[in-house]
Structure formats: structure tokens, C-alpha cells
Amino acid sequence: AWWKFWGGNEEDDGADKGKNKKKAKRLTPRQIGRRWGCAMATIVILLQLVRIYLKHKIKEERERVVGLVDSGKTVRNVTCASRGENPFVPSCSPSKCGRVVLEKAISPEHCAALIQLAEFGMSHGGGDGGATILDFPSGALSRGDQFVNLHQMLKSNHEELPQGPVHLLQHVIHMVKEQVTRHFGVENLLSTTPRFVSRMDESPAKTMHDEYWHEHIDANQYPGFEYTALVYLNKQGVKPGDGDFTGGEFSFVDPNHLGVGEPEETVVRPECGKLVFFTSGAENVHHVHKVLSGQRYALTIAFTCDSNKELKGKWS
């Protein structure tokens, strides 16, 4: 046996075994430390798993009830209001309602090009009361306290809208439609009118069309609207010199969450390239604050589910 080779005997081996048994009953400080380390590591892993699970559940709940901010995209889900007599159109009518704010949907260069396009058209008119509207599909343009047809004016003068910015506008419209379609999970979204750029300043209102600051519901103001989108083309500043204009914020108006008291407002501050889109029903009452200085530019794009109100052609 191996113990004989080394000069040992069976008795010695038995004695050693007895000693080892006694030693096995008592852990060394190092062994105790290792076991505590393993236990603590297990607890840390379990706590991390619980934290990840709770974080996931909180994220789901925030998305369902309030909203979330992720990569420049803010989402708030709201309960859909009744659509009245409007029929529900599968794959188009909203099965969920809400509002989305997407930062930097278009570049500063694109903002400038769309303002250039608007200014080209508005140079043939211009409202007297602080709000000038140019609707591209119909050609309706504010001039004084009335509307004229820009397309007819350009045709009679052998002019046309600059084609580069026109193609850009068509691209932006297509991008917005994709965003709305993807977010609300619809497929058969239809374009509709109006589809316009607005220019607002601090001039006092001359007609009811100039009073843009009143709370309203798009589906009531424009029957057939199901989804509304706004693309801001320049930046609001806190004071003159900070941005292109002051005032002119956009606000969603919601009932007080306590059920009593003043309504609550969610304010969106315009910036070049910011896209805001929402379902057009009574769940999204909103208004624009009065512009205090400068000029505010925004593009409005709308969608419907009513085939009788569908817009076709180059502006769709």
C-alpha cells in the first residue's frame, strides 16, 4: 500500500482519518467567507432579477396609463371618446386613442425649405388678423379678411410652386402617414383635407378665422377627421431672441384628475422638426396659445376613414 511506501502504517492512516473527521466538522474562516460570498452573490442576482421584472412591469403600466419617453418619443394613451354616428371602419378607425410627440422628425434644412415654400405662396396674399393659412390641395390662401385661390393666381401669372420643396412636402406627408399608421396599428388610413401651413403672429384678430386660440375638437371642426398631425417648422422661445417667436404653445386640455377643479393642460413647446399626432376625437381637446412676438409656422396634416372625404392626387 502507498502508506507503506512512505513509511506509514494502517494505524497511522486510521488515526489520520479520525483527525480529518474532526476537522470536517469545523469550517475554517476561509470556508465560511466563501460560503457567505456565494450566498450574498445569489441574493444580489435574485434582487437584480426582481428589479428587472419590476422595471418591466412599471414600464408596461406607464405606457398603458400615462405614457413614456424613449429616444425623443413621448406617448400618452387616453380613453377614446364616443365617435357618435361615425361608423367604425376596421383597420382604420382607432381602437386605441392617444397622443404622440416625436422630436426631430424632420431636419432644420427641411424646416427651412417648407417655410420657403409657404412664404412663396403667402407672398401672394397674407391675412390681416394675425393668422395666414395656405391649404395646398385646394389652394385656399388668406388675403386680407378673405380667401383667394393660389393655384388659379399662379396659373394666370404662368407661375408654379417651387418643385423641390413640393416634393419634400410630399415626402414629409408620407413619413407622417407611416408614423400614424405604425403607432395606432391601422392599415387603411386615408388622406383628407385641409392640409395646410399656418403662419401666426401677434396681430389682433380681424375675423373669426383669426381666433386660433380657442379650445376645440378637430373631429367637430372638421367632420371626418380621425387622426391629426402637426409638424412644427420653427422654434418657440421663452423671451424675444431665444427663438423665432414667443407664446404660441400647443396645449392638450384634460379634465382634472381629481374630478373637480380647473382642467389640466399638457403643454407642447414648438421646435423645428417636432411632430405631434393624435386621435381627433373629444379625448384630445386642444388649443394654441396666442403668439406674443415673431412668426410661428406649422404644417397640419389630417387623415380620415371616410372614403367620401378621401383626398387623392399629389397632395395625398
Image (cartoon, grey):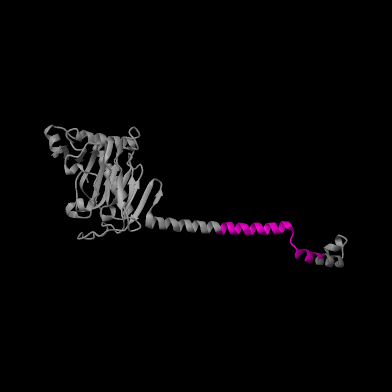
Residue 140 on the magenta span: no
Where residue 300 sits in the image (x, y, percent)? 25, 44
Residue 261 in the image: above or below residue 146: below
User: Residue 313 placed where, x, y %?
Assistant: 19, 45
- Is residue 137 in view? no
Quadrant in the picture for the N terminus: bottom right
Q: Is residue 209 visible?
A: yes
Q: Position of residue 112 (x, y in %)?
A: 29, 35
Q: Is residue 44 above or below residue 156?
A: below
Camera-side residue: 36 or 8? 36
Image spot of residue 47 (x, y percent): 55, 58
Of 300 and 109, nearer the camera is: 300
**Magenta segment, principal secondary structure?**
helix
> Residue lying furthest front in this view?
261
Report the number of discs: 0
Q: In this orientation, which residue lies closer to the viewer: 293 or 278?
A: 293
Compared to residue 211, the image places residue 257 above or below, namely: below
Residue in the picture at 52% in, 59% down: 50
Left or right: residue 71 compared with residue 42: left
**Would residue 1 appear left or right of 160 to someone viewing this image?**
right
Query: Please, which residue is most extreme toward the left here?
Result: 156
Instruction: Left or right? Give the position of 221 relative to 257.
Output: left
Residue range highlighted in magenta: 19-46
Q: Residue at x 28, y 37 (%)?
A: 292
Say whether residue 26 is magenta. Answer: yes
In this rendering, the answer to whether 53 lies above or below 215 is below
